[in-house]
Image (spheres, rainbow, N blue to C red):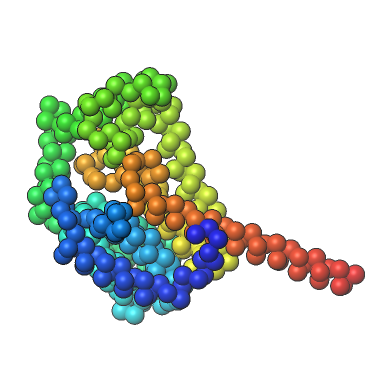
Amino acid sequence: FSFIPYSFYKVYLKVILIGVVLILIYTLIFAPSFKGAGRWLNILGFSLQPADLAKVVLILYLASYIERKGEQLKDLKYGYLPAIAWILSIAALILLQPNVSNGLLLVLTSLAILFFGGAKLKHLFVSAMGLAIAGLGAAMIMPHSRVRIMSFINGVNNKADINDQVKQAVMGLGSGGIFGVGLGNSRQSNLFLPEAYGDFIFAIIGEELGFVGAIVLLVVYLLIFVVGMAIAKKAKDKFGEVAAFGLSFMILLFAYVNMAVASGLLPTTGLPLPFISYGGSSIIFLCISVGILMNIGFSNQIKLESEVNTTLKTAEANV
């Protein structure tokens, strides 16, 4: 994906997005249930979570849409609402799986992209308030998410009632101290913290590498976003600019939310830590996102070199 010209996607994004909607509908109807949710499709022996595909495709589509609409994005009826309709369609199909955390963070990422693309603040504010109320209502209706939210609230009010997985994660983080117990020496991963290789891997990193290691990881994710913003700033077109922002912001947001959950700052979610948690389709689509970011960066470099060569040739001709 780092070698495919990112402008290639613009031609097919509408068709691909419609295909993603159909895949999400198929997932909703036919996906086998696992731990109370139907989120995965088995394709040729490989387990695919369509929500991971939907995140990348929606970000690229919004980037293309913002470029195409330009200043018309500020118009509620003809610019803003059609974008919101696509966002809500994708998010609703993910929420119904049920996959509340992925759906809500997809909406948050999309609103950030619209803000970056130049949408009106009053439109974004009203949307954010309405979607926050609707999202919280949906989370409280669904049994699994309601249990997690109430467990988090009870844990804040009464530490004795904290979720056991979160409790073990916080114990792991705390026992790491400043420099950690050393790589491979985690005690919490030895059956104390359930599925430590997945959503709560940050607790093991904090235990083995300590406070210093945890801070370094926070900074690394922030640097990915900073590099993404630098690529966006130098992009040769609006599509590349918005796509670079959206993809890098998605990585930062999902990483920080995962680490906040492992630290007991947010209710438990099913979000993996980007590039680190055990997983198949998640890490594949994260790598695809970085590949697209790299291609936008390469295109920026080619554009810069072309401009420099043109300037030199013009100067030589004048001389």
Quarter-wise, where is residue 137 in the image? Answer: bottom left
Horizontal relation, residue 251 to residue 224: left or right: left
Q: In this view of the protein, which residue sits in the foreground, 66 or 203?
A: 203
Please state which of residues 229 and 19 is positioned toward the viewer in this rendering. Answer: 19
Q: Residue at 15% of width from left, 28% of height from top?
A: 159
291 or 122: which is nearer to us?
291
Residue 19 seen in the figure: yes
Q: Quadrant of the C terminus?
A: bottom right
Residue 1 to residue 156: above or below: below
Position of 81 compared to 60: left or right?
left
For the point 44% across and 27% down, the residue is: 212
Position of residue 139 measured from the top left corner of the image (x, y, whole percent)? 15, 53
**Is 64 left or right of 96, judged from the image as shown?**
right
Q: Which residue occupies the extreme front position in the image?
A: 44
Q: Residue at x 37, y 75 (%)?
A: 14
Q: Residue at x 16, y 65 (%)?
A: 29
